Each structure stands twice: as structure tokens, then as C-alpha cells.
Image: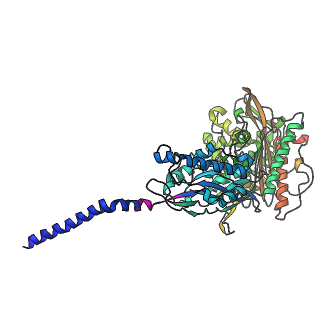
């Protein structure tokens, strides 16, 4: 009896369950399915409002202005491939005609749209967007357009006016290559940063989801601080039906504005640096000096870096361009293609790389302070050891000779005088060959290690994207002929080329007596309420341990005398000019060109600012690059003060020309016999 009762009860329970499942499936199923699908929502992102990039004094360099855009959400099926869509087609076409009429009447004359263009933007077949997603029809609406569509909202169902922003840049073209520019996210997925974002986009919260049409930073500070500047997307929360069309009233979550980034660049100093390069290039092209002009001097680069903080107060790459051509993704390549890259951190800024010339020439005699430092540190000679300079040096036992500038005989000199007089012979005989004699071929590795400790051949760690690490040719033993020859060429600057930023960091390392500090591009990041989110402080990357007397000897050799461009300068300062000779190609023919290089820091005893300047094809560094540096020092002194107190601008000699004795001291020598690389500076 108990078994029968158990089976009967089980039968009754299963019968009830089966009946209930059947009722759910066949009676309540369609209604429940409709409720489930009809209750779904989709979040459609709206472009975030980008924060501003400001200079050190708070002047906006790159900023976003609010604008209004018109979006349309399709409330019906207008796909001509379906019967319902074909039936509704005339309605949407009339809708488009009304919109175009309103645009033409109330909008800007040069921003007109045709009915065909509006129909295409509506994407009626949902080829580019889901059916429920709002379509962006027109941006940067006029006030009259906004007022018209708000007042006549009932005539335009599905229309929403959404606040967006347009990116603007200071029309004075302030450090434009360093600041960077924006382009659409859809075309930038080759960059690792955006490839990773695209891969995880579907899993991100609505505020962090990137739209395909969203403008993102692709270079400079715009890319470097993309996450801080971007802000958060707004979004429309849209109820949809099983046909993937809107089913209800969307709710709007407005975008959040990104943080503001205060860069270390000071507009006044930056503008002075840019103008100094422009003026000097014009002078070089048009004014005969020592019997010649330099018509090919078309480009120039300068970086000014604070020695105590690492702050980059100026970063100039000339020619530059107006970055407002990138507004809304416009691509005016004809005007910017040769100069939109930052020539102070890459070799691609000169616009003449096809000829074999770029913005990273050999550094020439600016290496000589480091050459002497290495010689002193390695015990190759002492500060009071003298060398007789006969005007040239012979590399090893072969007959190749490298001459001083104009083959000038300098007589008995020590390391400090060798820097001051720019002796190639001293560097070869006392540094290059002795380093080889001490280490053999391994001397190249020793040399390379010293270079990198001073930031030459490694990243500066500035954080700027696409930074070039430099050209290294001193490890090309086959080309040099021997390891001794390779070290000899390296000792006077003819087998290493480095960016202007690397040279500025190298100069600051000498000024800091061995502390290599990070070039800082930003002071702080603030939110829109002025609250500081992050600050950036001095950061030591590595320290080179040399004896104080060695530093003092080298800095003493970086003599301040003999530059007319610095006449009247109120500070004792340390400097080194350089002139590197390189081969370029014109119409398939090789020819030599002189590139001007100059590095300096001031004041000598309490260094505050380090400056590096490169002028490709500008001739000797003493008269092509040094005058630019002088104007940068003066601008900094006016704003901040090289002694810590701002001073009025010093009026005096512009210094575009140089005395004849400077050419004898710092000019380039003729190519050595048998090898075009064997030159003076």
C-alpha cells in the first residue's frame, strides 16, 4: 500500500509540473518573451568633453569649446528591403527634405547638406549602425539651428540636440609638434594603446567606451595624456524591441569633461625660441658670411630644459604648422605633411630626409666635454698632462690624418684647453687611441656605456611618444676600418647623432655633475574644479660618479669667450659649439653639408637652464645655432630669471654674425685624406 501511494503521489506531482510547463510554453510564453525583449536597453555612447592643455602660466594651448550636434533616432523601420520599410520610405525622405530646408535657412552658408547626404547619414539599412543607435547628422550647429529644432521638436520626432566639443589650438602655433593633434579612433588602431582599447571596448563601462568617430590623441601631449584629457563618454540609454528598434523614451547621461594638463612649456619662452629660429634661418639664407650664404638652411630645432627640475620650458621644431587643420579630423596634408612630426625627438622633422639629411645630424664637437671626462675618469691622462697639438692626428699606423679646424696648430694644451679650442687631435690621440690601447676592441663597449649614462643612445624617459633613440655608428668597425679608428671618430663627434632633447638632457647632466634627470613635460593635472589630481617632480634617472675635480676641469673648458652673439650677456655660462659634416644627395649626387650644433648651460656655477640647438645645413654652430640659444636664455631670464629673479629683456647685439677668429676656433676643417667622415667639428 505504501509503495502504491508513493508512485501515485509522484505521478500527480509530475503531471502538475508538465501541465505548468505546457501552460508557460504555449499560453504565457509569447507574452513573457515580449516583456523580456521589450525590457532590454542599449547604451549608446556620446563623445566625452576633452580637457585642456595649458602652458606653465595657465594660458590655454589646446582647448575644447562646446558645440551642438543634431542626432536622429529612427522610430520606425525604413529599410527598403522589407515591406514595412518600403512603405515608410516616403515619410523619411520628406523628413530629410524638411531638415535640409532648416539647415539651409538657419545654418552657415558653407555648411550646407543635401537631401541625399542626409539620407546617407541616416543609414536607413543599418549598414554602419544598429537600428536603435542615434545617427549623427550635423555638428557645430548655429544658435538659430538649435533654437529652430528645439521649438519644432514635434515636427521632428527622434531628433536630439546633443552638446559636444570641438578642439582648438592656439593660433600662435605654440609648440605644436610637442602638443600633438587628434584623429578619429577608427583609424588609429595600429597604435598599441588604441588596439588594446578596441579589443576590450565591449567590456568597458559606458563612460569609458570609445566611439569609432571619437577624436583621440595620436601624437605629443595629446597622446601622452590621453587618459587624463579624455574624460568620460555620455550615453543614451535606449529601450529596444525584438526588432532592434527603439521602444520607449531614451534617457540621457551627459558626458564628463576630462582633466586639464598644465605643461612645463612657457608660451613666452616658446614663442621667443620659435621666432629666434625663424629669424636665424632667414639670416643664414640671405646674408653672406665668410663668402657664402646657406640657402638650404630651412629647419631648426631647440630645447630648453631646467637643470634643477628637468622642466622643458621650450621645445621648438621649425617649420611648424597650424594644428587647427586637424579640427573635426580634417586632413590638410599638403601644408603639414613635411613638418607635423616633432624634429626635436625624431629624425623626421626636417622635410629633407629623402636627401639623406634629417633632424639628427652627427653631434660634432659638442661631444668633446664628455670625451675629456671619459679620459680623466679612465686615467688616460690627468688634468695637468699636456699634449702638443700639431694641427692633426694620425689614426694608428696608417696614413689617414684628421685635422683640426683649418688645420690650426694649437701647441701645448691640456684637456680643458682642448675643449675650449676644439682640438680634434687631442681627442683622437689622448682619448680614442688610448681607450683602444687600454681595452682593445672592448673599448667600443666602454664608450657606449658612457654615452648611455649621459642619455645619448637611450630614451630620455620624457614620456613623449615615438621618441628616437639616436644614431650609433661607432660600432661599425668595418666602415671605420678598425676598432681604433671607430673610437677615434667617436672621440670628436663623427659617429653619433642624437636628438635635440637628448642633447639638452646630456648638457643638463654635465651641469648637474652626473645626475641625469627626466625631462618633465607636465607640471600638474587638475580636474575642472581646480583640484590637483597629480603633480610631477624632479626625477633622477641615473647618476654618473666622477671626481669633482674632473667635472670642474671640463666645465672650465666649456669657455664662454669668443661668441659675439653672447656679447652683453649678464651671466658666466658654459658652452660648446659643434659643426658636423655629413653627406646628402641632390639629384643623385653626393655633397657635403655643415650642420650647426650648440649646447650651453647658465649660470656656470649655479646652473639653472640648459639649452641645445641644431640647425641642419646652417654652417658652423658658432654663428648658426649659438644666436638662437642666446635669445632663449634671454627669454628665460625675463620670465623666470637665471638667478631666480625675473629681469627685463636685455636689448643688445643680436649676434647673427660671428667674428673671423670664431671660424678659426670652431669651424669645420676640410675632409681628411681618404675618408669624408674625418673632419673637425
Location of the N terminus by quadrant is bottom left
Location of residue 349 in the rendering, given as x and y in whole percent from the top left corner: 72, 42
- Does residue 10 appear in this view? yes
Residue under the point 68% across and 49% down: 101
Between 164 and 192, the one nearer to me in the picture: 164
Whole-percent x and y of residue 596? 79, 41
Q: Where is residue 557 in the image (x, y as percent from the top left)?
A: 80, 50
Classify residue 168 by image quadrant. bottom right
From the viewer's perspective, tell me whether residue 503 is left or right of residue 91: right
The foreground one among 246 and 578 is 246
The C terminus: image quadrant: top right
Relative to 428, is 237 on the left or the right? Answer: left
Q: Where is residue 22 in the image (x, y as percent from the top left)?
A: 26, 61
Residue interval drawn in magenta = 35-43
| Outermost residue, top side | 588
| Residue 350 found in image quarter | top right
Q: In the rendered structure, does residue 37 fall within the stretch colored magenta?
A: yes
* Residue 601 appears in the rendering: no
Q: Is residue 56 above or below residue 428?
A: below
Give whichever of 26, 655 is nearer the camera: 26
* Furthest residue in direction left, as rendered: 1
- Visual colour scheme: rainbow
> Magenta segment: does it hold 445?
no
**Residue 54 sits above or below residue 589 on the image:** below
Q: How many marks?
A: 0
Is residue 346 found left or right of 284 in the rendered image?
left
Furthest residue in direction bottom, as rendered: 2
Amino acid at each position: 500500500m505504501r509503495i502504491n501511494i508513493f508512485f501515485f503521489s509522484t505521478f500527480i506531482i509530475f503531471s502538475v509540473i508538465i501541465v505548468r510547463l505546457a501552460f508557460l510554453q504555449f499560453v504565457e510564453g509569447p507574452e513573457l518573451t515580449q516583456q523580456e525583449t521589450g525590457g532590454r536597453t542599449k547604451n549608446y555612447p556620446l563623445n566625452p568633453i576633452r580637457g585642456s592643455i595649458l602652458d606653465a602660466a595657465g594660458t590655454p594651448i589646446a582647448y575644447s569649446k562646446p558645440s551642438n550636434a543634431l542626432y536622429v533616432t529612427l522610430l520606425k523601420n525604413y529599410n527598403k528591403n522589407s515591406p514595412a520599410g518600403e512603405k515608410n520610405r516616403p515619410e523619411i525622405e520628406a523628413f530629410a527634405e524638411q531638415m535640409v530646408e532648416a539647415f539651409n535657412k538657419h545654418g552657415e552658408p558653407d555648411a550646407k547638406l543635401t537631401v541625399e547626404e542626409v539620407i546617407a547619414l541616416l543609414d536607413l539599412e543599418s549598414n554602419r549602425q544598429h537600428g536603435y543607435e542615434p545617427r549623427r547628422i550635423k555638428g557645430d550647429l548655429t544658435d538659430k539651428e538649435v533654437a529652430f529644432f528645439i521649438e519644432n521638436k514635434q515636427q521632428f520626432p527622434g531628433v536630439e540636440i546633443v552638446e559636444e566639443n570641438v578642439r582648438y589650438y592656439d593660433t600662435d602655433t605654440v609648440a605644436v609638434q610637442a602638443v600633438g593633434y587628434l584623429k578619429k579612433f577608427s583609424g588609429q588602431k595600429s597604435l598599441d594603446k588604441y588596439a588594446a582599447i578596441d579589443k576590450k571596448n565591449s567590456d568597458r563601462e559606458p563612460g569609458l567606451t570609445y566611439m569609432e568617430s571619437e577624436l583621440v590623441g595620436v601624437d605629443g601631449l595629446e597622446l601622452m595624456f590621453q587618459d587624463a584629457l579624455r574624460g568620460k563618454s555620455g550615453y543614451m540609454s535606449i529601450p529596444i524591441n525584438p526588432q532592434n528598434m527603439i521602444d520607449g523614451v531614451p534617457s540621457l547621461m551627459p558626458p564628463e569633461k576630462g582633466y586639464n594638463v598644465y605643461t612645463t612649456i612657457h608660451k613666452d619662452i616658446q614663442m621667443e625660441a620659435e621666432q629666434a629660429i625663424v629669424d636665424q634661418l632667414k639670416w643664414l639664407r640671405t646674408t653672406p658670411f665668410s663668402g657664402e650664404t646657406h640657402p638650404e638652411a630651412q629647419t631648426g630645432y631647440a630645447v630648453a630644459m631646467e637643470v634643477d627640475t628637468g622642466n622643458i620650458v621650450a621645445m621648438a621644431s621649425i617649420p611648424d604648422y597650424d594644428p587647427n587643420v586637424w579640427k573635426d579630423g580634417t586632413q590638410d596634408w599638403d601644408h603639414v605633411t613635411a613638418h607635423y612630426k616633432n624634429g626635436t625627438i625624431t629624425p623626421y622633422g626636417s622635410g629633407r630626409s629623402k636627401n639623406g639629411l634629417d633632424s639628427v645630424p652627427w653631434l660634432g664637437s659638442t661631444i668633446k666635454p664628455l670625451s675629456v671626462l671619459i679620459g680623466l675618469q679612465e686615467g688616460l691622462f690627468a688634468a695637468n698632462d699636456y699634449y702638443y697639438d700639431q694641427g692633426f692626428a694620425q689614426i694608428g699606423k696608417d696614413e689617414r690624418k684628421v685635422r683640426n679646424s683649418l688645420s690650426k696648430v694649437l701647441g701645448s694644451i691640456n684637456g680643458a684647453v682642448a675643449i675650449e679650442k676644439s682640438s680634434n687631435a687631442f681627442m683622437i690621440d689622448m682619448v680614442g687611441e688610448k681607450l683602444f690601447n687600454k681595452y682593445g676592441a672592448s673599448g667600443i663597449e666602454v664608450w657606449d656605456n658612457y654615452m648611455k649614462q649621459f642619455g645619448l643612445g637611450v630614451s630620455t624617459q620624457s614620456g613623449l611618444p615615438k621618441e628616437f633613440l639616436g644614431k650609433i655608428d661607432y660600432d661599425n668597425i668595418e666602415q671605420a676600418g678598425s676598432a681604433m679608428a671607430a673610437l677615434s671618430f667617436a672621440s670628436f663627434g663623427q659617429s653619433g647623432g642624437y636628438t635635440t632633447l637628448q642633447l639638452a638632457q646630456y648638457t643638463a647632466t654635465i651641469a648637474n655633475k652626473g645626475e641625469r634627470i627626466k625631462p618633465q613635460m607636465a607640471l600638474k593635472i587638475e580636474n575642472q574644479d581646480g583640484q590637483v589630481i597629480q603633480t610631477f617632480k624632479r626625477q633622477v634617472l641615473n647618476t654618473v660618479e666622477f671626481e669633482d675635480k674632473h667635472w670642474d676641469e671640463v666645465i672650465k673648458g666649456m669657455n664662454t669667450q669668443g661668441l659675439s652673439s653672447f656679447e652683453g650677456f649678464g651671466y658666466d655660462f658654459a658652452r660648446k659649439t659643434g659643426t658636423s659634416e655629413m653627406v646628402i644627395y641632390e639629384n643623385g649626387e653626393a655633397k657635403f653639408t655643415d650642420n650647426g650644433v650648440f649646447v650651453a648651460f647658465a649660470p656656470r656655477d649655479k646652473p639653472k637652464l640648459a639649452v641645445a640647438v641644431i640647425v641642419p645645413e646652417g654652417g658652423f654652430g658658432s654663428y648658426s645655432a649659438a644666436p638662437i640659444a642666446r635669445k632663449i636664455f634671454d627669454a628665460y631670464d625675463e620670465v623666470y630669471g637665471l638667478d631666480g629673479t625675473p629681469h627685463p629683456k636685455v636689448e643688445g647685439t643680436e649676434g647673427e654674425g660671428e667674428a673671423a677668429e670664431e671660424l678659426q676656433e670652431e669651424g669645420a676643417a676640410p675632409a681628411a685624406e681618404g675618408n669624408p667622415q674625418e673632419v673637425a667639428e
